[in-house]
Image: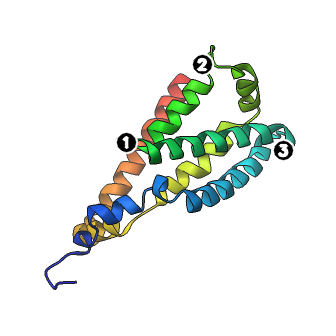
Amino acid sequence: MKTHESPIDQFDAEALKELRPENQLGKTALVLAAVCVAAWFSNIVNGSPLLDALPGMLILYVMVIIGLVIGRICPFYLPSVAWVSLISIIATLPFFPGNGWIIARLAEVDFLAVVTPVLAYAGLALTGREFAMFKQTGWKLVIVALLVFTGTFIGSAVVAHVML
């Protein structure tokens, strides 16, 4: 690394392309399986039986893997989340064979319990790029972040109090 090169410049486009989930299907499938198992167990939070949610979790897993595979073999780039969303939408359309069964199995999955840990991780997932930017902005960013979080919390509480 050159002395004038910042940590942000260390990442080139090819290296970042290699890190995309669709380019590492094996690792992604294993991590996704672990996340699905954790999400499946989090389904207990609302008292749902584990075995009732198992087919729905397997369907979600298969939809994500199919979306990643399509993203890998497609000749043009579209983010993986778009492919996964497209597959999920198509599989639940009224004219899709077996959509009633798919929807019934997915209804057994408590999505609030599944999505909460995933969103928490997504909010905490920081890369080297974010750390480098944080070092440049310093302590002022912490104050601004705390004010934004506090304002958002108070605003949400006020809206909830008025509406509920």
Which mark's residue is nearer the viewer, 3 or 1?
Answer: 1
Query: Looking at the picture, how far across and down is residue 3, in whole percent?
Result: 16, 85
| Label 1 packing within 10 angstroms: few (<14), some (14-19), many (20+) | few
Confirm whether residue 138 shows in the render: no
Q: How many marks?
A: 3
Give the quarter of the figure containing the C terminus: top right
Residue where numbered disc 3 is placed = 50
The residue under the point 60% across, 46% down is 116
The residue under the point 70% across, 25% down is 103
The residue under the point 30% across, 56% down is 144
Query: Looking at the picture, how far across and down is residue 62, in whole percent?
Result: 65, 42
Q: Are marks 3 and 1 in contact (CB under 8 Å)?
A: no
Three-letter amino acid code of the residue under disc 3: Leu
Which mark's residue is nearer the viewer, 3 or 2?
Answer: 2
Comparing 78 with 42, the one in front is 78
Residue where numbered disc 1 is placed = 75
| Distance in Å between CA atoms under marks 2 and 1 | 26 Å
**5 lies above or below 86:** below
Q: Do the residues labelled 2 and 1 touch (CB within 8 Å)?
A: no
Q: Is mark 2 on a helix, strand or loop?
A: loop
Mark 3 or mark 1: which comes first in sequence? 3
Give the quarter of the figure containing the N terminus: bottom left
Query: Looking at the picture, how far across and down is residue 56, in whole percent?
Result: 74, 37
Residue where numbered disc 2 is placed = 93
Confirm whether residue 150 shows in the render: yes
